[in-house]
C-alpha cells in the first residue's frame, strides 16, 4: 500500500513538472560537431526522461542476465528448502501423534532436502523417531551428539535426563539435570531435580542458593519461594541443633519469620530459645503458631517451657493455650494431659470427653483410658475405652507418599520431594465405622423396677456347644408386669468363646427380649451385632 502511494506521488510530481514547463515556452539549442540542434524545452525534457528510463531498463536487463545463474540456483534451492521444511513439519506432527513409521519416513526425506547442520530440528526428529520405534540406544546417541552443539545442548541434556529417569538411574538423571541447571537455572525440570539431589545429600545451603536463583528468574512465585526457604531453613536448623546451636537458631528464626504458622519451624526455634533461657520470646513464637493452627508438639513445648515448673503451673499454661484457641480438640487434649499430670481427674475427664465430642480420634480415647485407670483403676472400663480407641480414626500425623511419620522431615523418603509431609489423619482410618453410635456420650440408662419378690427369675438359656443359633432369654412371670433380672456373673461366664463377652452387672437391669422377632431376620436387617451390654 505504501509503495502504491509513493508511485502515485512520483507520477503526480512528474505531471506537475511537465505542466510547469508547458506553461513556460522556451527553446534549447545544442551545438555539436559543427551542427546546431534547436528543440523546444518540452521536447528536450521528454528526451532526457526517456534516455534515463532507457538506461535504467538496460542496466536492469544486463544485471538480470548476469545474475541469472545465481537466481535460477537460488530458486531451486528455496524450493528444495520449502519441501524439506514441509517434510520436517509433517514428521514433527507424526512424532507428536505417535506415528513412528511416518516420522521416520519424513525424517529421511527432510535429511535429504535440508542439512542437519543448517536445521537442528532434524536431529530432534531423528531422536523422536528412534524413541517411537523403541530404539532407545539410538535415541541416546542422538542426544549425546546434541551436546556438541551449543544451540542443542540443553535439548540433549533434557533427552538424556528423561532416558535416565526411564531406566531408573537417578544418579545419572541428577547429573544431567545439574549440568542443565548450571547453564539455565530457569529450567523447571532441571532445577527441581537438582533441588531433590541437594536435599537428598543434606546440602541445605546449596538448595537455598538454587531457590534464590529460581526466585530471581521468576520461575516460582514469591510465596512458593518463601515456603521452600522456610522448609530448607528448618531442615538446616535440625541438622545444626547439636553441632552449632547459634547457626541453628538463626536459621530457625528466619524460617519462623517466613512462615509463622509452620509448626516445625516454630517448635525448633522455641526449643533453641528455651535452651538459652529466653522463655518469653520462645513462648511468643509458640503462641503465634498456636493461634494460626494448634499442634500437639507446640502444646507440649509450651507447657514444658520451664523444666522446673510444677504440674499445676503446666496446667495453667495449658489453659492459657486453650483460651487462645477455644473449641478445638487439640486445646482440650492439651489441658487434659496437663490435668492428668496434676492428678486433677475431673478436669482431665471433662476436657478429654469434650475433645471426643469435637473430634473423635484414637488419642482422645487412649487419654481417657489413662485417666480412668489412674482415677478408678476399673479395668473393665479401661478395656472398653481401648476397644473404642482401636476402632476410632487415627490421630493426625505427618504423612507423605503413604508414609506416616511421628516427626516432620523436609523431604519424602519415597520420592525425595521437598516439603512433601502434611499434617493430617492417615487415609486408612477415615471410613465410616460400624459401631459408631457406641462412641456417643454416655446417657442415663432407663431402669425398670423389679418386684420385691419375683416368683420366677429370668433365665438365660444357652444352646449346646456347636449350635449356630443365638442364645435366647426365656422369661416367665405369673404377673402381668414385666420382670427384669440382671445378668449374673455365672451366665456371663457361660457365654461361648465366639460370642460377644458380657461383664457382670450389679445394679443395671436388662430389658426383656422381644419374642416376636426372629433372631435370624433381625441379624439380616441390622448390620450391627447383638451385644449383651
Image: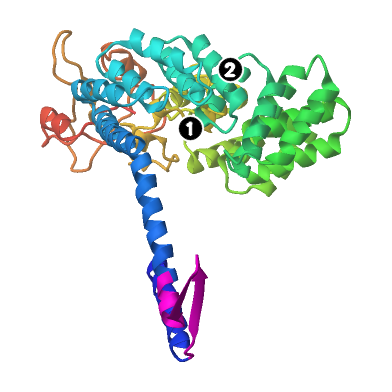
User: Was residue 34 drawn as part of the magenta stretch in this picture?
Assistant: yes
Q: Position of residue 391 (x, y in %)?
A: 40, 26
Asked if residue 396 shows in the view, the reply is no
Q: Nearer the viewer, residue 93 or 376?
A: 93
On screen, residue 141 versus residue 480, left or right, reads right
Of circles 2 and 1, the one toward us is 2
User: Was residue 245 drawn as part of the magenta stretch in this picture?
Assistant: no
| Residue in view at x 39 percent, y 12 percent | 140
Judging from the image, what secondary structure is the residue with disc 2 in? helix
Please identify the quadrant where the C terminus is shown.
Answer: top left
Judging from the image, what secondary structure is the residue with disc 1 in? loop
Quarter-of-image position of residue 203? top right
| Residue in view at x 24 percent, y 15 percent | 133
Quarter-of-image position of residue 249? top right
Q: CA distance from mark 2 to mark 1?
A: 38 Å
Asked if residue 204 shows in the view, the reply is yes
Q: Position of residue 89 (x, y in %)?
A: 28, 34
Q: Nearer the viewer, residue 264 or 148?
A: 148
| Residue in view at x 44 percent, y 39 percent | 442
Q: Which mark is residue 197?
A: 2
Q: Which residue is mark 1?
A: 361
Q: Which residues are magenta?
A: 24-47
In the displayed structure, 130 sits above or below 225; it is above
Amino acid at each position: 500500500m505504501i509503495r502504491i502511494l509513493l508511485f502515485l506521488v512520483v507520477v503526480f510530481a512528474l505531471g506537475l513538472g511537465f505542466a510547469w514547463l508547458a506553461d513556460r515556452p522556451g527553446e534549447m539549442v545544442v551545438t555539436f560537431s559543427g551542427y546546431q540542434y534547436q528543440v523546444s524545452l518540452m521536447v528536450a525534457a521528454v528526451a532526457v526522461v526517456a534516455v534515463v528510463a532507457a538506461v535504467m531498463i538496460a542496466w536492469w536487463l544486463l544485471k538480470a542476465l548476469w545474475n541469472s545463474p545465481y537466481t535460477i540456483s537460488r530458486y531451486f534451492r528455496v524450493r528444495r528448502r520449502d519441501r524439506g521444511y514441509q517434510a520436517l513439519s509433517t514428521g514433527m506432527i507424526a512424532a507428536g501423534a505417535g506415528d513412528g513409521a511416518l516420522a521416520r519416513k519424513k525424517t529421511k526425506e527432510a535429511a535429504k532436502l535440508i542439512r542437519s547442520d543448517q536445521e537442528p530440528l532434524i536431529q530432534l526428529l531423528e531422536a523422536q523417531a528412534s524413541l517411537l520405534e523403541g530404539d532407545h540406544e539410538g535415541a541416546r546417541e542422538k542426544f549425546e551428539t546434541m551436546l556438541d552443539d551449543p544451540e542443542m545442548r540443553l535439548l540433549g541434556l533434557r533427552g538424556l535426563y528423561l532416558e535416565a529417569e526411564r531406566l531408573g538411574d537417578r544418579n545419572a538423571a541428577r547429573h544431567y539435570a545439574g549440568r542443565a541447571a548450571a547453564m539455565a537455572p530457569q529450567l523447571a525440570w532441571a532445577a527441581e531435580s537438582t533441588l531433590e539431589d541437594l536435599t537428598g545429600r543434606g546440602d541445605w545451603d546449596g538448595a537455598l542458593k538454587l531457590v534464590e536463583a529460581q526466585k530471581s528468574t521468576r520461575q516460582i512465585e514469591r510465596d512458593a519461594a518463601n515456603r521452600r526457604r522456610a522448609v530448607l531453613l528448618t531442615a538446616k536448623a535440625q541438622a545444626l541443633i547439636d553441632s552449632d546451636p547459634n547457626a541453628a537458631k538463626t536459621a530457625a528464626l528466619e524460617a519462623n519469620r517466613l512462615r509463622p504458622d509452620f509448626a516445625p519451624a516454630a517448635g525448633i526455634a522455641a526449643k533453641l530459645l528455651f535452651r538459652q533461657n529466653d522463655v518469653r520470646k520462645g513462648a511468643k513464637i509458640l503462641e503465634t503458631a498456636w493461634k494460626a493452627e494448634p499442634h500437639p508438639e507446640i502444646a507440649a513445648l509450651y507447657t514444658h517451657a520451664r523444666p522446673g515448673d510444677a504440674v499445676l503451673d503446666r496446667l495453667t499454661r495449658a489453659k492459657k493455650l486453650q483460651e487462645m484457641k477455644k473449641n478445638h480438640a487439640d486445646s482440650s487434649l492439651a489441658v487434659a494431659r496437663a490435668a492428668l499430670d496434676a492428678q486433677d481427674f475431673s478436669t482431665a475427664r471433662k476436657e478429654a470427653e469434650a475433645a471426643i465430642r469435637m473430634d473423635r480420634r484414637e488419642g482422645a480415647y487412649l487419654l481417657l483410658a489413662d485417666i480412668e485407670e489412674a482415677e478408678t483403676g476399673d479395668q473393665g472400663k479401661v478395656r472398653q475405652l481401648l476397644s473404642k480407641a482401636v476402632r476410632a480414626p487415627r490421630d493426625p500425623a505427618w504423612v507423605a507418599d503413604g508414609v506416616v511419620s511421628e516427626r516432620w522431615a523436609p523431604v519424602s523418603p519415597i520420592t525425595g520431594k521437598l516439603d512433601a509431609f502434611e499434617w493430617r489423619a492417615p487415609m486408612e482410618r477415615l471410613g465410616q465405622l460400624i459401631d459408631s453410635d457406641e462412641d456417643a456420650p454416655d446417657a442415663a440408662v432407663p431402669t425398670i423396677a423389679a418386684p420385691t419378690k419375683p416368683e420366677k427369675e429370668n433365665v438365660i438359656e444357652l444352646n449346646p456347644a456347636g449350635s449356630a443359633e443365638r442364645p435366647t432369654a426365656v422369661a416367665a412371670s405369673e404377673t402381668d408386669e414385666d420382670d427384669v433380672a440382671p445378668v449374673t456373673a455365672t451366665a456371663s461366664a457361660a457365654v461361648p468363646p465366639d460370642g460377644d463377652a458380657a461383664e457382670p452387672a450389679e445394679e443395671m437391669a436388662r430389658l426383656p427380649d422381644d419374642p416376636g422377632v426372629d433372631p435370624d431376620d433381625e441379624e439380616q436387617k441390622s448390620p450391627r451385632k447383638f451385644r449383651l451390654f
